[in-house]
Image (cartoon, rainbow, N blue to C red):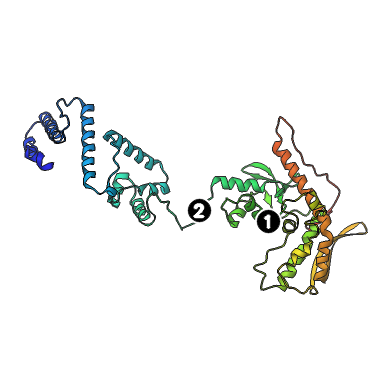
Amino acid sequence: MKNLIKKHGGGQFNSDTENLPSSQEQRYTKEEAKRKLNIVFELLDSPTVRDIRRLKYIRQNVDAACSILHTLCDMLLDTEDKSINQHLSMKDINALLSGFNTLFQQSGDVEQIRLLTISPDSWGRTMIQKWFNCSEYQARQALLLKKNKGFLAFPEYSNGNKPLSDSTIKLVTEFYLQDGISRASPRKKDVIHINKVPVPVRFMEITGREAFQQFISQNPTTNIGKSSFYALRPRQIKFNAPLDTCLCIYHENMHLLLKGWNKFLKNNLPDRNAGLELITDKYLINRIVCGIPFEDCFNRRCNTCSMVNPSDILLENININKDENSSWSQWKTLNNKVDLHHINGFAYSLLDEIDSQWTKFLLHSHVTTEQKEYIKILRLNSSENTYIVAQIDFAENFTIFQQREVQ
């Protein structure tokens, strides 16, 4: 095609226009372009150009000629190498390319590298850098990404942890503020200022490990590690309760018994200590009661789970001598006064004590949990147009001298 155009006088184009004035040069250039287009149109049996003012008509002829050339090219290629020709006009193609370039400029750094993998295989780093107006680093990273992972792959970076999404941060923060996870301090003075806004202090009701396990069970699709979960704890949430906060004797005594059992296992099973999970009251409740518990399960009247004792669970898959010495603590009332007693005895005595307190503790724990859930539902359904919920703890003239003291 190029040789045919040269034969029709195209080779004298530059030398003939060097000595012409600018207006005549422009006119001559247009005439030459018209003549060469007509040569192409005649070869493709397309209508020729007569009036250069009919721009829309000329554009249509050019688009038709390009479509014919693409079709002729596909005839020469193998079936699998044929181009996808949707007979788009040059105007539409330019609009698509311009829109894609705008999308690239408005995207973030990571997404820009991903979009650069769309560039043709024949393009090198310099061509990508010029056409997209991107940096040399982005062009190089795009070529490596396309080579290693393919078209429109997502880049991965190993120079740091991926940041958590705002939705995950909000979910963890709201979890810490839930009743049952933390509770409001009864003291009026327990207030801290965050960004000059007074916020009441809350105290954790469970350990950090228990809170993390509960969060994962409630949100299994959320990807977050322990350290990130602990770091997102709001400033007003405190782990250590103050000395003037009393605890429930049922919960605290069961906590002390299980603490003594965990200590006994640590001392007598050093080889398996790393693989053993700390036994908690919630762990025992989940293991003993039915999968779908009813009221009878917590009253120990269920025909299925009432025959299972905590000691049966605690002795699973371990071989110990129950006559070994162990130690634990208990709150007991003597002479109308509650004191903390430290007890030394055999391991079987500790297990018997856990079994003896289990029935009363299980029912008490169930009632407490149901009350908290009901108050939580009331708060969620309350509004300024319906009702408000105020949880009141009546103060008493009671002085606490020890941490985690019961009343």
Considering the numbered disc 1 on the image, is that residue within a helix, a strand or a loop?
A: helix
- The percent position of residue 189, horizontal first and vertical second, equals 74, 45
- The percent position of residue 322, horizontal first and vertical second, equals 79, 72
Question: Local crowd at mark 2 within 10 Å, few (<14), some, or many (≥20)?
Answer: few
In the displayed structure image, the side of residue 220 where residue 248 appears, left or right: right
Considering the numbered disc 2 on the image, is that residue within a helix, a strand or a loop?
A: loop
Residue topped by disc 1: 210
Q: Residue at x 28, y 52 (%)?
A: 124
Number of callouts in the render? 2
Q: Earlier in the sequence, mark 2 or mark 1?
A: 2
Q: Quadrant of residue 308?
A: bottom right
- Reply above or below: 13 against 400: above
- Reply above or below: 193 against 384: below
Alpha carbons under labels 2 and 1: distance apart = 25 Å
Q: Amino acid at mark 1?
A: Glu
Q: Is residue 249 in view?
A: no
